[in-house]
Amino acid sequence: MSGYERSKAPLALMEQVIMILVFALASAVCLQAFVYSDRLSRGDEQRQNAMAKAQHVTEYCKANHGDLEKAGGILGAEVTEEGLEIRYPEEKMILSLQLTERTDYLQKAVIIVSDMEDAEIYNMDIAYQIGGQP
């Protein structure tokens, strides 16, 4: 045996540094995946909330046989020339019902739910009977 032996400490240190780099890279990828899934979850929750609000407004329009003044009064909506507009500040949404085609007994409309920056979240075409007994 020779009197001079090399220490294995630098090799062990290099292995630990490589392991730390691999774990750091894996944790960065996992963190990005968690952030992305959270963003998707929040977006889906917002779309579901917008859909529920649109269905709610549709049911009130149907129940009141197209009397937007009455439906708007119940819903706390602003009645406009185009239809209704309802602001939901707690959800940061604006719902707009825009009247489209009308026949003697049927009113068609589109409901658009958007965020405060006017980015559309959800839209739905609706039709309801007008006139008759509320």
Image: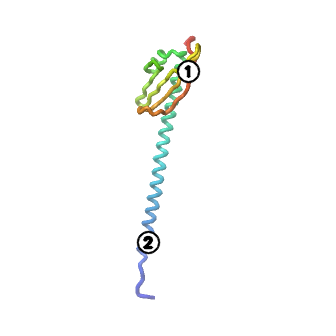
The residue at the point 46 percent across, 61 percent down is: 22
The residue type indicated by label 1 comes to Lys
Residue 57 in the image: state x and y as whole percent.
51, 23
The residue at the point 45 percent across, 58 percent down is: 25
Q: Quadrant of residue 17?
A: bottom left
Location of mark 2 (residue) = 12
Location of mark 1 (residue) = 108
Residue 58 in the image: state x and y as whole percent.
53, 23
Residue 71 in the image: state x and y as whole percent.
49, 18
Q: Residues within 10 Å of mark 1 (few under 14, many from 20)?
A: some
Marks 1/2: CA distance? Answer: 74 Å
Q: Residues within 10 Å of mark 2 (few under 14, many from 20)?
A: few
The answer to whether residue 121 is above or below residue 74 is below
Res. 88 visible in picture: yes
The answer to whether residue 23 is above or below residue 71 is below
Q: Looking at the rendering, in which quadrant would you find the N terminus?
A: bottom left
The residue type indicated by label 2 comes to Ala
Q: Quick one: label 1 or label 2, which is nearer the N terminus?
A: 2
The residue at the point 54 percent across, 17 percent down is: 63
- Residues 100 and 94: in front is 100
Q: Secondary structure at mark 2?
A: helix
Residue 91 in the image: state x and y as whole percent.
43, 32
